[in-house]
Amino acid sequence: MSFSDRELLARIIMCEAGGEGENGMKAVATVIMNRVEVPTGEYSRVSEGGNIRNIIMQKGQFTCASDTIGNTYNPQNIYNMRPTDVEYEIADWALSGNKLNEIGECLWFMNPYSLACPQTFPYNGSGSLLTRVANHCFYAPTPLYHET
């Protein structure tokens, strides 16, 4: 089954941040749209000028986009999500060009499963900690990202 961009975005929002409240879901949606729109680096090449599907489905980026992890079935994946009106509203909000201001130009997020956020992520130094929203830490690109 091929999902529309809206459906795919609503499903990834629910899967990655469904328990994070409205701001948490908007923060994740902002990162995805930042990746779609960034003019340089890896995500610029992956998005091929604005392809949301390419960004969401890029291998190794979002656990929820995989139906298996380490050869084991991943039950928390976008195919099993059933978005509600809230996720669709946030997807529409993001597709309309809105962004959560405190996320800025962040290209990554991660849940460290602790109170402390690592200062860099990914660990190659291409992202630097900007903020935390709910359980997720958000990372802005460093100059190194633009060389990817």
Image (cartoon, rainbow, N blue to C red):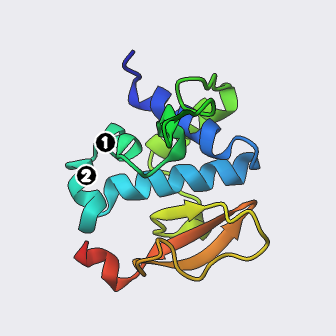
**Image x and y of residue 139, in percent:** 53, 72
**Image x and y of residue 71, in percent:** 48, 37
Quarter containing the N terminus:
top left
**Under tag 2, what secondary structure?**
helix
Residue 2 or residue 93, whichever sits in front = 2
Residue 69 or residue 30, whichever sits in front = 69
- Count up the numbered dots: 2
Q: Of the numbered discs in the image, which one, if any, rests on residue 54?
A: 1
Q: Of the numbered discs in the image, which one, if any, rests on residue 45?
A: none
Residue sitting at 40 percent across and 82 percent down? 142
54 on left or right of 133: left
Q: CA distance from mark 2 to mark 1?
A: 6 Å
Q: Does residue 93 appear in the picture of this structure?
A: yes
**Marked residue nearer the N-terminal end (2 or 1):** 2
**Under tag 1, what secondary structure?**
helix
**Image x and y of residue 35, in percent:** 38, 57
43 on left or right of 137: left
**Image x and y of residue 89, in percent:** 61, 34
- In this view, which residue lies farthest toward the top? 1
The relative height of residue 21 versus residue 132 in the rendered view (above or below) is: above
Quadrant assignment, res 34: bottom left
Residue 10 or residue 94, whichever sits in front = 10
Residue sitting at 57 percent across and 78 percent down? 129
Q: Residues within 10 Å of mark 1 (few under 14, many from 20)?
A: some
The relative height of residue 144 versus residue 79 in the rendered view (above or below) is: below
Q: Residues within 10 Å of mark 2 (few under 14, many from 20)?
A: some
The residue that disc 2 covers is: 46
Quadrant assignment, res 12: top right
Kindly indicate whether the residue at mark 1 contacts the one at mark 2 (C-beta within 8 angstroms): yes
Residue sitting at 31 percent across and 42 percent down? 54
Amino acid of disc 2? Val
Amino acid of disc 1? Asn
